[in-house]
Image: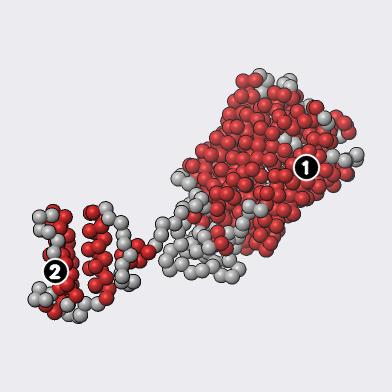
């Protein structure tokens, strides 16, 4: 062991390396690698004896480079403390789809049905109810304003219920209540019954649809939040295909039967979606966006409230309420949302412009199709550009579309509305709710978003009644919708000047 000298085991390794035939180019390269590593160990050995880690580094480096050059498969090593043995013992794991995307799919289905039968489709019930009972349009639209009021009042508490009981249980409760609300609405004979049924329906929709879905999706994503919310909200646009179906169902049966069918549909769709909802990825040993757990990651607390993302902002509901950003955003959402709240008048308005209900139904369908493009496009841009600028462009498109709608007298006027309003309306929604999470964080997202909806609901209450009242007084829908268009413009500078909120990181 003259060559090994005082190195002992290194001498054995050196002889094994020299035993490779010198005529092989691979052998020469291997011996060269070995000699370089051996020189390092000899230098270090002048100060201290070779340790197990040095031996492991030499043996592992030689074996790794040799196998990379030969393409040989790893074989189990007799030494358990070497990197090569650890690598060879690990088996490749199958990469599965991040569970958050299943929540997105389920949430999109829920949004599609809710949008097609209520947010966009309930306007189809407006004329038949008014014609049968002879109620004024402002009085009838007051139920929608009541819906906005009640929804705004309960929204902050829904976030607390989601934290306390989980999104699954909250959504199940809301789904059953929504079905009951539609059934009660089909049985009305008096105005007070109409309002009472709408109260039940609103409570069910608040607990069983939009707020639960957006809160859950926002909790499961950070880097891809805009994209995830855009895919979720795309369901609302796709749901527009149900509007002509609702109109057909009312025409072939009657509005009471159609309400019962729609209500039963909420059970069929809502129950499976509810069982897909889960609170936060940390509660299930995962991280947002499907990120890999860091080696030094601490397990979540028993209550699941410890965020694994150290750089993520956390703002409490009380801190949000004390900030200027919260109130500026609330007012901007409120004034820009007035035209959305007034959308219950869109189908009656189109018929008042001299077009048929069939044309109105397909116009709403067109809006839905273009809103899908807007939602998906803003989801892509929202993760790459300043979300405030994306929202501002979307609001500008809404302004153009609403002006075109207000002065429509030909089909091509309506086509301008369908394209610009559809894209603008769709683009504003997912980025808006992604911006809320960016500003205030995930921890209290449900409560903060619910409180935002409460404050902005004041404007949503005014819009449907105001549009109906102006129609009753002036006899046309052009003036009120022109007013709604300019309300959108007010929100643009407010969105662009939003700052940051001081919170904990």
Residues 492 and 81: in front is 81
Q: Residue at x 65, y 40 (%)?
A: 112
Q: Is residue 285 left or right of residue 188?
A: left
Q: Residues within 10 Å of mark 2 (few under 14, many from 20)?
A: few
Residue name at image x 56 percent, y 62 percent: 284
Could one spot residue 244 in this view of the protein? yes
Residue 397 rendering spot, x and y as whole percentages: 56, 33
Q: Is residue 58 above or below residue 166?
A: below
The quarter of the image holding the N terminus is bottom left
Find residue 263 and name its label: 1
Residue 335 is at least partly visible in this image: no
Q: Where is residue 153? Give x, y as percent.
A: 73, 53
Q: Is residue 265 above or below residue 470?
A: below
For mark 1, give the secondary structure.
helix
Circle nearer the N terminus (1, 2) = 2
Binning the other alpha carbons within 10 Å of mark 1 as few (below 14), some (14 to 19) or many (20 upward) gives many
Which of the two residues, 310 or 234, is positioned nearer the viewer here?
Answer: 234
Instruction: Name the residue tied to disc 2.
Output: 15
Relative to residue 433, is residue 86 drawn left or right? left
Q: Are marks 1 and 2 in contact (CB under 8 Å)?
A: no
Tell me residue 105's x, y (percent): 59, 45
Tell me what residue is drawn at x 69 percent, y 42 percent: 114
């Amino acid at each position: 062991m003259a060559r090994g000298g005082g190195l002992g085991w290194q001498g054995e390794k050196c002889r094994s390396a020299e035993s490779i035939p010198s005529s092989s180019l691979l052998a020469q390269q291997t011996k060269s690698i070995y000699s370089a590593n051996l020189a390092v160990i000899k230098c270090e050995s002048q100060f201290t004896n070779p340790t197990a880690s040095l031996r492991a580094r030499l043996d592992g480096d030689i074996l790794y480079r040799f196998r990379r050059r030969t393409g040989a498969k790893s074989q189990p090593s007799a030494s358990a403390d070497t990197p090569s043995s650890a690598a060879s013992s690990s088996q490749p794991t199958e990469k599965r789809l991040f569970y958050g995307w299943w929540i997105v799919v389920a949430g999109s289905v829920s949004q599609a049905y809710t949008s097609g039968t209520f947010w966009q489709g309930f306007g189809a019930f407006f004329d038949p109810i008014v014609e049968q009972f002879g109620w004024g349009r402002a009085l009838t639209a007051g139920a929608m304003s009541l819906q906005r009021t009640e929804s705004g009042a309960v929204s902050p508490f829904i976030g607390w219920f989601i934290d306390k009981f989980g999104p699954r249980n909250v959504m199940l409760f809301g789904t059953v209540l929504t079905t009951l609300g539609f059934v009660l609405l089909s049985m009305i004979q008096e105005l007070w019954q109409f309002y009472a049924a709408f109260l039940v329906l609103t409570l069910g929709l608040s607990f069983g649809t939009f707020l639960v879905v957006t809160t859950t999706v926002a909790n499961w994503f950070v880097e891809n939040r805009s994209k995830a919310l855009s895919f979720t909200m795309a369901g609302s646009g796709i749901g527009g295909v149900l509007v002509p179906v609702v109109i057909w169902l009312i025409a072939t049966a009657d509005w009471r039967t159609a309400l019962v069918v729609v209500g039963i549909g909420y059970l069929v769709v809502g129950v499976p979606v509810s069982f897909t909802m889960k609170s936060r990825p940390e509660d299930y040993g995962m991280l947002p966006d499907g990120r890999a757990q860091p080696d030094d990651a601490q397990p979540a607390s028993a209550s699941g409230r410890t965020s694994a993302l150290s750089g993520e902002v956390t703002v409490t509901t009380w801190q949000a309420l004390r900030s200027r950003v919260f109130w500026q955003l609330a007012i901007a959402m409120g004034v820009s949302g007035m035209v959305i709240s007034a959308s219950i008048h869109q189908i009656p308005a189109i018929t008042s412009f001299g077009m048929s209900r069939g044309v109105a139904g397909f116009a709403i369908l067109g809006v839905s199709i273009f809103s899908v493009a807007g939602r998906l496009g803003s989801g892509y841009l929202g993760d790459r550009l300043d979300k405030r600028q994306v929202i501002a462009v979307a609001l500008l498109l809404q302004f153009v579309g609403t002006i075109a709608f207000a002065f429509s007298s030909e089909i091509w006027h309506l086509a301008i509305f369908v394209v610009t309003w559809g894209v603008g309306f769709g683009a504003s929604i997912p980025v808006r709710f992604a911006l809320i999470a960016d500003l205030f964080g995930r921890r209290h997202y449900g409560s903060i978003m619910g409180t935002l909806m409460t404050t902005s609901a004041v404007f949503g209450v005014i819009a449907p009644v105001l549009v109906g009242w102006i129609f009753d007084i002036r006899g046309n829908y052009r003036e009120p919708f022109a007013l709604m268009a300019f309300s959108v413009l007010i929100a643009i500078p407010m969105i662009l000047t939003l700052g940051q909120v001081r919170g904990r990181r």
